[in-house]
Amino acid sequence: MISTIQKWGSFVRFSHTVFALPFALAAMLVAARDNRGWPGWRVFGLILAAMVCARTCAMAFNRIVDRKFDALNPRTKNRHLPAGQISLASAISLCVLSAAGFIAASWFLNRPCFYLSPVALVAVCFYSLTKRFTDYTHVFLGIALALAPVGAWLAVRGTEITGGEILQVSVLSAAVILWLVGFDIIYALQDYEFDKAHGLRSLVVAWGPQNALAAAFLAHMIMCGLLMLFGLLCHFGIAYFIGWFLIVGCLVMEHWIARRRSLNWINLAFFRLNALVGVIFLVVVAAEVIFQGGFKLR
């Protein structure tokens, strides 16, 4: 059983949930702050279930539609579908069941979440097709990831969301988009030659590695500016801005690794440092919400 769980977890890269989840949970905490308390374990559990189901659906869809390219790419030829470790029918079943789980979780949250759930599913799955027709595939992935804090905020506030809150979550979502654009460009460096040879598109292929890296760095610097603006809009204090400096340090180190080290270091820059960015953000937002007395567990 453990082996089966590990196989399916590896198939959908379950560990990469750490990228979107901290921003969703941080958005949930800030949204709940105005209600003077924890949104409740039921809402928290449903947000968590929706996040996991949406991401599992998107990743399964990605593996399904890219299976032929994965089989040709030396870096990905040993993935589960090309290697025959998981059948196509099983992958499709997982994709459909995850989509159903996401819609069900949205139904139990509130009406806005339920009505928008099909739109969210289309957005998170559509990214997998974009590399076939646009160089800006990273932006579409960023939009998919940015739906996480929006969905969590709506899960807590529903139709009671205010104009000020819309501004806050919009700034946070824009920061997430730029964060994703930056680190996905770095990740795409690994497949530059393969994508170029097989007609797959990205900013790395369109602009070349060096120019794309410059664009990634610019995206991350603008993201840092937006995170600072988010902190100001939320009236956060010193704890948040200490975390902000740590996030800037992580991103600078990521770009140093991407420029100075071999491609073997890309996974370090991609996974560990970006996972750390998300964890730092969640921790400092939670600290601010608690220290300001706007959060009570109930």
Image (cartoon, grey):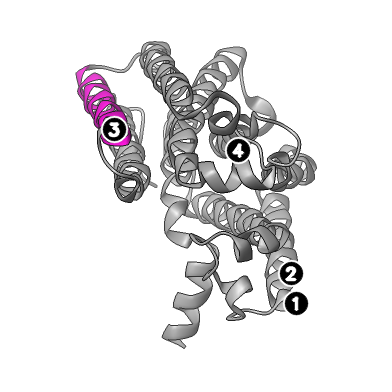
Q: Residue at x 20, y 23 (%)?
A: 242
Q: Secondary structure at mark 3?
A: helix
Q: CA distance from mark 4 to mark 3?
A: 32 Å
Q: Is residue 292 above or below residue 124?
A: above
- Mark 4 lies on a secondary structure that is helix
Instruction: Write down the residue under mark 3.
Output: 290
For the record, the magenta segment spans: 238-259
Locate residue 32, reporting x and y percent: 47, 33
Q: Do the numbered discs 4 and 2 sit on residues whose CB atoms are within 8 Å? A: no
Residue at screen point 38% across, 16% down: 221
Could you give the CA–CA distance between mark 2 and mark 1, rounded to whole angstroms?
5 Å
Q: Which circle, 1 or 3, is nearer the viewer?
A: 1
Q: Circle 4 sits on which residue?
A: 141
Q: Is residue 271 magenta?
A: no
Q: Spatial distance from mark 1 to mark 4, Cα to Cα?
A: 25 Å
Tell me if mark 4 has few (under 14), some (14-19) or many (20+) residues whose alpha carbon lies within 10 angstroms of its own. many
- How crowded is the residue under tag 1: few (<14 C-alpha within 10 Å), some, or many (20+)? few
Alpha carbon of mark 3 to alpha carbon of mark 2: how far? 42 Å
Whichever of labels 1 and 3 marks the residue nearer the N terminus, that label is 1
Q: Which circle's residue, 1 or 4, is located before the other in the chain?
A: 1
- What's the residue type where badge 1 is placed? Ala
| Residue 101 shows up from this direction | no
Residue 85, given in percent of the width and then of the height, sits at 58, 81
Furthest residue in direction front, as rendered: 197
The residue carrying mark 2 is: 92
* SS category of the residue bearing label 1: helix
Distance between mark 1 and mark 3 Cα atoms: 47 Å
Q: Which residue is mark 1?
A: 89
Q: Judge from the rendering whether residue 228 lies leftward or rightward of residue 207; answer left or right.
A: left
**Image check: 242 left or right of 265?**
left
Label 2 sits on a secondary structure element that is helix
